[in-house]
Image (cartoon, grey):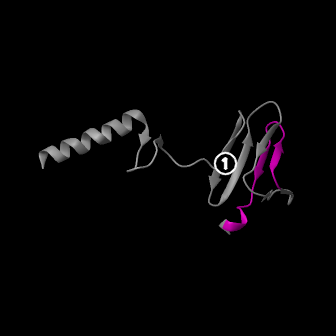
Amino acid sequence: MVVSRSVSLLCASQCLRTGAVRQRGAPRREAGPAPALPGLPEGVEAVRRGPYPFLLNHGRTPAAVPLPSPRTDLLTGRTHHTGVRLDRFAVMVLAPPESAI
């Protein structure tokens, strides 16, 4: 019992030290939630509030953001099929994909 507790503490401390989580048979990945949208350009942040991804361009230049599926910008009502262009310091709120509704 003491040995298993020591092993558990050792494993937990290794996960905290390396910042990685590994499930049995799964590849190693960084700890934390999955990104709201993958493949973001530098200066662009994506955060999820409920099912809605918010895109924020913190950069001084416009940025092209690829989209994995067609999404509608909830602020303008415009549908984007393959990607969006975010002006400098712009914000966009996207509708969830059709499959998530």
Which is nearer the eye, 71 or 76? 71
| Number of numbered markers | 1
User: SS of the residue at dot 1?
Assistant: loop
Q: Is residue 57 magenta?
A: no
Looking at this view, name the residue that lies furthest to the front.
25
Q: Residues within 10 Å of mark 1 (few under 14, many from 20)?
A: some
Looking at this view, name the residue that lies furthest to the left.
1
Tell me the residue that label 1 is attached to. 37
Q: Which residue does the image show at 68% across and 67% down from the upper left? A: 99
Q: Amino acid at mark 1?
A: Leu
Locate the C terminus and report the quarter of the image it occupies.
bottom right
Quadrant of the rendered image containing residue 7: top left
Q: Is residue 94 magenta?
A: yes
Q: Magenta region: which residues?
A: 81-99
User: Quick check: 25 left or right of 38?
Assistant: left
User: Quick check: 83 left or right of 30?
Assistant: right
Q: Position of residue 46 (x, y in %)?
A: 67, 46
User: Quick check: 70 left or right of 22?
Assistant: right
78 in relation to 65, above or below: below
Q: Which residue does the image show at 70% across and 40% down from the upper left? A: 40
Which is nearer the eye, 20 or 92? 20
